[in-house]
């Protein structure tokens, strides 16, 4: 194994001169001796810095989810529908960027692309800082700046594709789960800390609002500085794998495989729900449980105290989902996750039927709705927990599916098996990007469904959206069972060799 940023070992003694000191020529994670004699340490170091960079990407991606709730108080005359659209735009761009970001890892190298993608976060952060300081900034400019926040959403695909190459099949579920959870946690952290950093109060009221007012640009400057740190850390501590190099045409072969689109459909239900609900939660709380008077904290439930909890729960349960998938099979855990999402989404919908619409003008209505908030929050957090578990288990399924197809078509111990497993790893990494891109579309569609410009009453739009989401989860559960678990399914039978 060629790596010069680690102390040399018996398995890491040669240096690649053609491509530089941060390239690894010999990478055999499936071989136990290789893994224990240096490979594991290198993989863990790359995973740690990948998590850091991806965490920042998610934070920047979702910076509008909580900052949008402060814009009206800052003097920007935006409607609730405009704010939901502003929250949705980064998710659309992030979803579209995930496919090219996935292909960037084999093209440029995992270390090199992590440097580039981290440096690109300076664009959305610095332009955000400029826009929020000028109340005359037009809405269309905010939309363009919000679109650049999608750079952070693209980071997920390249990070997951990169880490997939570093770990053996038996450890991919946990490694990918940790990598994804570190990124997902960025959503919760930005929603927790942004109100504190900008002076808008937070952490359940333990941090009070600043007397001098809110300064949204402070959060942008903090994350711009962290992006610089991530760029330098990737340059110093991460590696590229020559075995991860492939042509885009080879990677695009996965779009012809039915499993790519089946898993994309399921991942829209798990990750799409996680990122969509995370983006919309601050505005959902603000519109249904809070009124702005008396300033600065208003009456009812102040959104900044609770907005981060959903993303935090979903992030924390994601590696647990990966671990459960390694132990019991990804398809089974994914199915159970959808069942839980159906039950608890219906419970959230029930709490919404108890609310009085539009408590924007009457503090008494806000106080009445507040009595239902613990039920709303508790059931919603259960939905988030289920999405996190489903995210981890679904991502475990992808490399398992491709590896199993390589094994059932070749003989053990043959050169054909070795080549097939190498191709399977590359294709699985590409599939992770395609599936991740499709899943992120949920982050765009869910806030738009809550906005529903064709529905006059925002609360009615919210209830209608949750009903549609529940029906989608039912379809996802049926598909997961029929394709990967049903005993009479010939496809399921052919996949019985591994726990998918």
Image: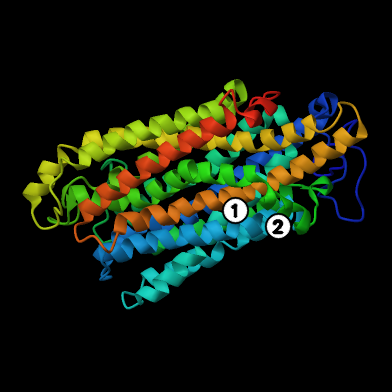
Residue highlighted by disc 1? 155
Does residue 127 sit above or below 69 in this rendering? below
Q: Position of residue 32 (x, y in %)?
A: 81, 24
Does residue 414 sit above or below 124 in this rendering? above
Q: Is residue 120 visible?
A: yes
Residue 163 circle label? none
For the C terminus, the quadrant is top right
Residue highlighted by disc 2? 104
Say left or right for 30 vs 381: right
Q: Position of residue 205 (x, y in %)?
A: 25, 43
Q: Residue at x 58, y 21 (%)?
A: 328
Does residue 202 sit above or below 222 in this rendering? above
Q: Position of residue 305 (x, y in %)?
A: 29, 44
Q: Residue at x 12, y 55 (%)?
A: 294
Q: Secondary structure at mark 1?
A: helix
Say left or right for 66 vs 293: right
Crowding at mark 1 (Cα within 10 Å: few <14, some 14-19, many 20+): many
The mark total stands at: 2
Q: Earlier in the sequence, mark 2 or mark 1?
A: 2
Q: Position of residue 430 (x, y in %)?
A: 69, 49
For the N terminus, the quadrant is top right
- The answer to which image quadrant residue 353 occupies is top left
- The answer to which image quadrant residue 461 occupies is bottom left
Residues at discs 2 and 1 in contact (Cβ within 8 Å): no
């Amino acid at each position: 194994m060629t790596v010069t940023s680690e102390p040399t070992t018996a398995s890491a003694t040669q240096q690649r001169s053609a491509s530089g000191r941060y390239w690894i020529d010999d990478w055999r994670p499936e071989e136990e001796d290789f893994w224990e004699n240096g490979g594991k340490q290198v993989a863990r170091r790359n995973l740690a810095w990948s998590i850091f960079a991806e965490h920042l990407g998610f934070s920047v991606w979702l910076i509008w989810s909580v900052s949008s709730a402060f814009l009206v108080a800052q003097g920007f005359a935006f409607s609730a529908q405009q704010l939901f659209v502003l929250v949705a735009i980064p998710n659309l761009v992030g979803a579209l960027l995930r496919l090219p970001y996935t292909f960037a890892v084999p093209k440029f190298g995992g270390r090199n692309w992590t440097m580039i993608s981290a440096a690109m976060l300076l664009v959305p952060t610095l332009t955000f800082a400029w826009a929020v300081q000028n109340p005359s900034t037009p809405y269309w400019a905010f939309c363009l700046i919000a679109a650049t926040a999608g750079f952070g959403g693209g980071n997920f695909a390249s990070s997951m594709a990169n880490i997939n190459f570093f770990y053996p099949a038996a450890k991919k579920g946990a490694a990918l789960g940790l990598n994804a959870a570190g990124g997902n946690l960025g959503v919760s952290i930005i929603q927790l800390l942004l109100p504190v950093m900008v002076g808008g109060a937070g952490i359940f009221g333990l941090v009070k609002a600043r007397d001098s007012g809110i300064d949204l640009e402070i959060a942008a400057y903090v994350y711009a500085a962290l992006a610089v740190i991530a760029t330098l850390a990737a340059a110093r501590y991460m590696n590229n794998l020559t075995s991860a190099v492939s042509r885009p045409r080879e990677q695009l072969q996965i779009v012809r495989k039915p499993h790519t689109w089946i898993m994309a459909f399921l991942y829209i239900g798990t990750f799409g729900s996680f990122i969509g609900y995370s983006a919309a939660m601050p505005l959902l709380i603000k519109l249904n449980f809070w009124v702005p008077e008396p300033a600065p904290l208003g009456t009812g439930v102040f959104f900044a105290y609770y907005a981060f909890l959903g993303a935090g729960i979903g992030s924390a349960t994601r590696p647990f989902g990966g671990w459960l998938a390694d132990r019991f099979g990804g398809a089974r855990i994914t199915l159970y996750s959808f069942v839980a999402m159906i039950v608890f989404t219906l419970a959230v919908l029930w709490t919404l039927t108890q609310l009085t619409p539009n408590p924007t003008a009457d503090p008494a209505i806000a106080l009445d709705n507040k009595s239902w908030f613990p039920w709303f929050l508790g059931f919603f957090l259960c939905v988030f927990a289920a999405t996190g578990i489903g995210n981890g288990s679904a991502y475990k399924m992808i490399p398992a599916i491709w590896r199993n197809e390589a094994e059932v078509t070749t003989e053990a111990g043959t050169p054909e098996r070795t080549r097939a497993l190498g191709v399977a790893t590359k294709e699985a990494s590409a599939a992770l990007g395609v599936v991740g891109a499709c899943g992120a579309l949920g982050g765009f569609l869910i806030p738009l469904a809550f906005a529903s410009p064709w529905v006059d009453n925002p609360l009615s739009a919210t209830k209608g959206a949750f009903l549609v989401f529940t029906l989608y989860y039912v379809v996802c559960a049926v598909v997961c069972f029929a394709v990967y678990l049903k005993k009479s399914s010939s496809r399921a039978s052919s996949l019985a060799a591994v726990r998918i």
